[in-house]
Amino acid sequence: METFKQKVDEAVLFLRERMPEPPEIALVLGTGLSGLGERIEAPLVLPYASIPNFPVATVASHAGNLICGRLCGKPVAVMQGRFHYYEGNSARELSMPIRVLSLLGAAALIVCNSAGGLNPAFAPGTLMVLRDHLNFIPDNPLRGPNIEAWGPRFPDLSTPYNLHLLDTALACAAREGIERVVSGVYAAIPGPSLETPAETRYLRQCGADAVGMSTVPEVIVAIHAGMRVLGISVVANVNDPDNLKPIILEEIIAETKRAEDRLARLLLAVFSKI
């Protein structure tokens, strides 16, 4: 754990010397959602490979940059792409950037992802604001010795997603006339294999409205660090366990891209209210 802390400290020092100002908000853009990074004002673009000890991004649809600048007048740090358990990272490693950004001053985290729909009432392109999650990734980023300066040994997750931010997102969607915005429960699975019909049926019975392979380890670290969290999933497809069709990654990315403008409108509206 001491070695991991040293790695985090090195990344913090590297970024602190280069960032124009400390970020107030950290934003993670997932599969097919990197476009919002182009709206950052006065951007400083740092490829992940240039940041000491950052994991290596191996997913083609993730740009792999940290962009620092301003969005809606607020200092932000935007991750264009993230890291996953299925890439071979531990939960601690894949969530390291969130730890780094929290130590740099970010008090809020907005996480976005592309997910498969489980709720039959959803349609492709639905934006689901997370109100809770189920963690089926067989690792926890807080496993091992706890660093008290980073957060408590047993962080409370009774409200993992900040209720004020959740209500703000739903209110912004209504005010801006952004259609197909709902709230729901996200299930995180390890991947990279997709769900079987039986697994899809099981996740539905567990109460999940959408499923993906990311986000939850990042949220756990953010809560441990005392950050407020808002999560939004782009539902790229809807899984019917009784009529499950082959899931093609290219089609998921394409559907996510089609929803990106609506997600950007929602995020910009939320940013203006934070």
Image (cartoon, rainbow, N blue to C red):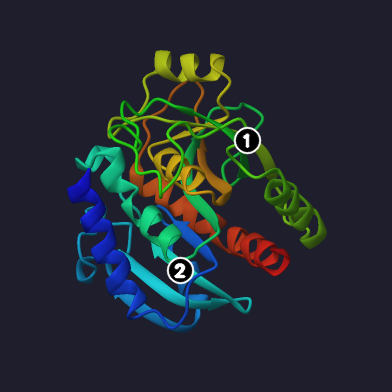
12 and 207: which is toward the camera: 12
Could you tell me which residue is drawn at 43 percent across and 75 percent down?
68
| Amino acid marked by disc 1 | Thr
Where is residue 31? Give x, y as percent: 40, 52
Residue 54: % across, % down: 24, 59
Q: Secondary structure at mark 2?
A: strand
Residue position for label 2: 77
The residue that appears at 42% across and 66% down in the rendered structure is 104
Few, some or many residues within 10 Å of mark 2 (<14, 14–19, 20+): many
Q: In the depicted view, which residue is nearer to us: 159 or 255?
A: 159
Q: Is 160 placed above or below 3 here?
A: above
Residue 207 image offset from top left, x and y in percent? 58, 20
- What residue did someone put label 1 on? 159
Q: Which residue corresponds to the image point at 74% horizontal and 55% vertical from the top-left? A: 173
Residue in front for this viewpoint, 39 or 47: 47
Relative to 273, residue 44 above or below: below
Label 1: how many Cα within 10 Å (few below 14, some 14–19, many 20+)? few
Residue 36 visible in rendering: yes
Image height of 201 relative to 234, above or below: above
Q: In the image, 51: left or right of 274?
A: left
Quadrant that contains the C terminus: bottom right
Q: Earlier in the sequence, mark 1 or mark 2?
A: 2
Question: Can residue 57 be spotted in the picture?
Answer: no
